[in-house]
Image: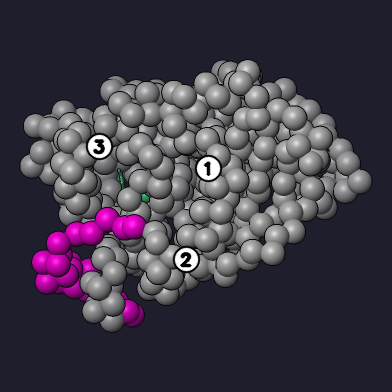
Amino acid sequence: MTSTTGEALNLEKVIPNAEDFLPLNGTDYVELYVGNAKQAAHYYKTAFGFQSVAFSGLETGNKDQVSYVLQQDKIRLVLTSPLTPDSPINEHIVKHGDGVKVVALWVDDATKSWEETTKRGAKSYMKPQRMEDDHGHIIRSGIHTYGETVHIFIERKNYDGPFMPGFRKWESDYNPAPTGLRYVDHMVGNVGWGEMNKWVEFYARVMGFAQLMSFDDKDISTEYTALMSKVMSNGNGRIKFPINEPAEGKKKSQIEEYIDFYHDSGVQHIAVATNNIIETVIDLRNRGVEFLRVPDIYYDTVLDRVGEIDEELEPLKELGILIDRDDEGYLLQIFTKPVVDRPTMFFEIIQRKGAKSFGKGNFKALFEAIEREQESRGTL
Ligand code: TYF
Ligand code: FE
């Protein structure tokens, strides 16, 4: 398997005609274990513009846990809280705080997905199981990945309900407008010291992913902190998982800070795509979402680096949106502050205009902005 530094690779050239033993249609849902799912659901509706879709809890006969399902275009979020002291979800929350438990992947055959991955060494989380109701049936199965995070494979070709059996449609009178978020572009995992290659190999061997890019500590370091990152992608490019590990610097890497507070490897950021980042970010800001900011001087030279772009520079500067270019085009991106109590999970808003990369040209300015946040928390 080949890799380059910071350059996008054409996967078809990397694995010509390779048979995909794990065809993936996309991200099915992302499930967070949270302390108060009702309030978290309100936050994702109000602040991010997600729509109410489905519910499971006491009213549907579920006495163990409560889940709210929210959706915005192709992005589906599930927010789950325990209802009893002996639910294992409690332990997850005690250890990690609110965070991503499940990155669910939409497949045509959940049984085959489980068989192909477990026979290549994945640890099973859930054997293939069929669940049915009036709307048909789904089949799901699951495997463990880094930390306590899991992948659940969802086969829903014989199902037309709002989410899956066990859930019913959630009709709410409170429906804030969407903010233009469209699909999950990538989801990033932070893993412990020296563990990046182990998880890169896991995605290659167990799930048939290929490495798109690699960034070493020389690419990703400021005067003070460093990290390393490799981007893994499935064959059709719909699922992209960068994996970060901390690297040695004068001060504490943001990845180490994450691991210190999450007490484990876990999902660091969910990058969501928009077709109009300026409108989306104005909307999100008006709804109270807080973003990281780079110094204004970033905008003095950015066009020398990225060349001509369709957007006016002034609103990008006003909002703190970052710009980068690769061989195929450019991208616009911005990062929220952590959206949970601990300095762990955050969102990236991204608009791609041809570029297939991840914003390498912004890493230094971005990581210096993160250091200022670490400084303010006393964790640098
Ligand atoms: O997903 C990426 O690789 C980019 C860059 O802590 C990035 O969004 C990498 C690490 C990080 C924040 C952003
Ligand atoms: Fe990202």
The residues tagged by marks 1 and 2 sit, at their Cα atoms, a distance apart of 22 Å
The residues tagged by marks 3 and 2 sit, at their Cα atoms, a distance apart of 26 Å
Task: Give residue 203's position: percent from left, percent from top.
Answer: 49, 31
Which amino acid type is marked by label 2? Answer: Thr
What residue is at 28 percent from the left and 81 percent from the top?
312
Which amino acid type is marked by label 1? Answer: Asn
Q: Earlier in the sequence, mark 3 or mark 2?
A: 3
Task: Give residue 80's position: percent from left, percent from top.
Answer: 61, 38
Q: Earlier in the sequence, mark 3 or mark 1?
A: 1
Q: Report which quarter residue 118 is drawn in.
A: top right
Q: Helix or strand or loop: what does disc 1 sit on?
A: loop
Residue 293 on the magenta segment: yes
Q: Helix or strand or loop: what does disc 3 sit on?
A: helix
Q: Which residues are magenta?
A: 290-311
Q: Which residue is mark 1?
A: 234
Q: Which residue is mark 2?
A: 274
Circles 3 and 1: CB atoms closer than 8 Å:
no
Disc 3 Cβ-to-ligand 1 distance below 8 Å: yes
Q: Quadrant of the N terminus?
A: top left
Circles 3 and 2: CB atoms closer than 8 Å:
no
Q: Quadrant of the C terminus?
A: top left
Q: Which residue is mark 3?
A: 254
Badge nearest the viewer, 3 or 2:
3
Check disc 2: other Cα within 10 Å, few if <14, some if 14-19, many if 20+. many
Which amino acid type is marked by label 3? Answer: Gln
Circles 1 and 2: CB atoms closer than 8 Å:
no
Q: Report which quarter residue 170 is drawn in.
A: bottom right
The residues tagged by marks 3 and 1 sit, at their Cα atoms, a distance apart of 27 Å
Image position of 131 with respect to 302: above or below: above
